Amino acid sequence: MPIAHYAYTALDCPNPWRLAHFYSQITDWRVQPFEEGETEETCEWLELHDLTGRTMMGFQKIDNYKAPTWPSGDVPQQVHMDFHARDLDITEKKLLAIGAHKASHQVRPHRFRVYLDPIGHPFCIVQSDGD
């Protein structure tokens, strides 16, 4: 029997609302509504929910956030996520249009590509025939 069950990944960021909306555009998951009286400026935590209402990602406000300097530098990547897509070229165009940046370091761009979200978290789009 497991000690615990994995729930979801939470990312540190300076603005949970902006980063949640970025990943919402990639996944089509819904951004949790603000609690009463909460605004983009006062929000400390937001989640993305799938169609069933299950939390899939979390975003926590960090005042002194430092973007990773991956693949080298003083700030390691800390964590990265993989997303699957059928067509890497079409997906890349859509990612760049919503604010992602293609990382200069690419290992196997024919099979997976590395991008940075608007605040520097690296993530990969992996070629998939089934998703």
Image: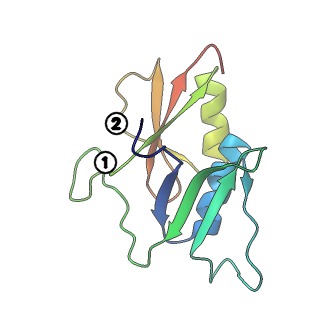
Give the residue at x 44% y 52%. 121
Say if 46 sits above or below 28 in the image.
below
Viewer-nearest residue: 21 or 44: 44
Q: Where is residue 44 in the image (x, y as percent from the top left)?
A: 56, 76
Eye-nearest disc, 2 or 1: 1
Say if 42 sits above or below 87 in the image.
below
Q: Where is residue 71 in the image (x, y as percent from the top left)?
A: 28, 44
Q: Which colour scheme is used?
A: rainbow
Any mark on residue 70, and which? 1
> Is residue 77 shown left or right of residue 86?
left
Any mark on residue 124, and which? none
Would you say the residues marked 2 and 1 are in contact, meaning their CB atoms lie under 8 Å apart?
Answer: yes
Give the residue at x 48% y 44%. 6
> Which residue is label 2 attached to?
105
- Crowdedness near tag 1: few (<14), some (14–19) or many (≥20) residues, C-alpha within 10 Å: some
Q: What residue type is labelled 2?
A: His
Res 80 quadrant in image: top left
